[in-house]
Image (cartoon, grey):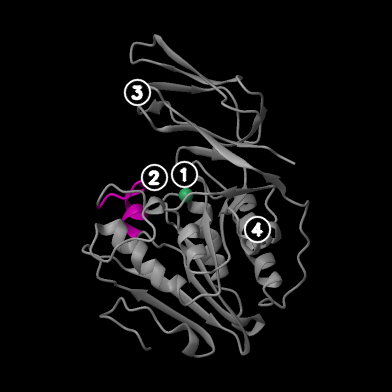
Amino acid sequence: MAGQEGRGGIPDLKHLPTGATRLLLEPELGHPVRIPVHLLRGERPGPRLLITAGVHGAEYASIAAANQLARLDPSQLSGTLAVLPVVNPPSFFARSIYLNPVDGQNLNRMFPGDPSGSFASRLAHWLGGWMSQADAYLDLHGGDLIEQLTPFALYPAGQPASAELAGAFGLPWMLADSGTTMSVAAASRLGLPAVLAEAGGNGLWPEAAVSALYQGTLRVMAKLGMWSGPALAVPTPPRQLSSFAWLRAEAAGFWHPAVQAGDQVEKGQTIGYLTDLLGEPVSQALSPEAGVVLFIVTSLAMNANDPLVGIGTGSR
Ligand SMILES: [Zn+2]
């Protein structure tokens, strides 16, 4: 295993034994962590696909799907699958929303990271070391503990190879994103096609959401020529969205959502309303655009400037 630094060194993915290798890595990130890693090497040559889950530690459908993928039969694989189902253990064990408890940062806003930065920044940088050895990247998400979500795949804008994999994933919606600090943006800058796939939410991992992420990953693997299992049909071709409009809370208080994930809304439609701690109306949340509700926050507790809803717009 070349490239080891302590017990957290990233294995050399080009020189793995065939079959499954399972590791608990302890990278030096300024805070003790044990990160589970499953390396599946087929007997036939093929691409190296990196799969992460649990960037947000309470997005359980993503973690459950990654655990299933980690148990695929390597003999049916061409190439190498590297699966990291719980990349952010402090966030997982704290059951935290958005932010990890060590430095209060959102890991998916910290890429490409910094080896001398805070915990989340160092973790992002360490994950970059995995990306640099891969040919393609899937980051599985599952709707956070307080989010209701309709499944979608997000990919870096202007990246046709990523768009192709997002289409192959086969979730109902796909969306190009021009953010620069997410995992998939970092992977894209390293030249990898990359997709962030979301299904699940509200701290649950129903079979439908886990299966959507598991089957979608197998479809991507088939597209990459890595999977020789049964052919997987795309249920219906994903619909393309052109932008992601987020609405944030004007003030803290009680949040009363009025629409559901998957609903179509008009520009100016009431999405929900905020009341203060005495129950007096504070503000109506009006949809900034016409589109589909990709996620809506369901918690009664609302902090100023927290997300309320994300609308996918420009469907075609
Ligand atoms: Zn997430």
Asked if ligand 1 lies within 8 A of label 1, the reply is: yes
Q: How many marks?
A: 4
Question: Of helix, strand and loop, which one carries label 2?
Answer: loop
Provide the residue designation for mark 2: 98
Above or below: residue 260 compared with residue 52:
above
Figure quadrant of the C terminus: top right
Q: CA distance from mark 1 to mark 4?
A: 24 Å
Query: Between disc 1 and disc 2, whose residue precedes?
Result: 2
Q: CA distance from mark 2 to mark 4?
A: 26 Å
Provide the residue designation for mark 4: 163
Image coordinates for residue 10, horizontal then vertical, percent = 37, 78
Figure quadrant of residue 301: top left
Query: Between disc 3 and disc 4, whose residue precedes?
Result: 4
In the rendered structure, which amino acid carries the disc numbered 2? Answer: Tyr
Q: Are marks 3 and 2 in contact (CB under 8 Å)?
A: no
Question: Of helix, strand and loop, which one carries label 1?
Answer: loop
Q: Which residues are magenta?
A: 89-102
Question: At 45% across and 42% down in the image, what residue appears?
Answer: 145
In the rendered structure, which amino acid carries the disc numbered 4? Answer: Ala
Q: CA distance from mark 3 to mark 2?
A: 17 Å
Image coordinates for residue 128, horizontal then vertical, percent = 40, 68
Image coordinates for residue 9, horizontal then vertical, percent = 32, 79
Asked if ligand 1 lies within 8 A of label 3, the reply is: no
Label 4 environment density (alpha carbons within 10 Å; few <14, some 14–19, many ≥20): many
Q: Nearer the viewer, residue 66 or 151?
A: 151
Provide the residue designation for mark 3: 252
- Which residue is most to the front? 158
Q: Is residue 122 visible?
A: yes
In the rendered structure, which amino acid carries the disc numbered 1? Answer: Asp
Q: Are marks 2 and 4 in contact (CB under 8 Å)?
A: no
Closer to the observer: label 1 or label 3? 3
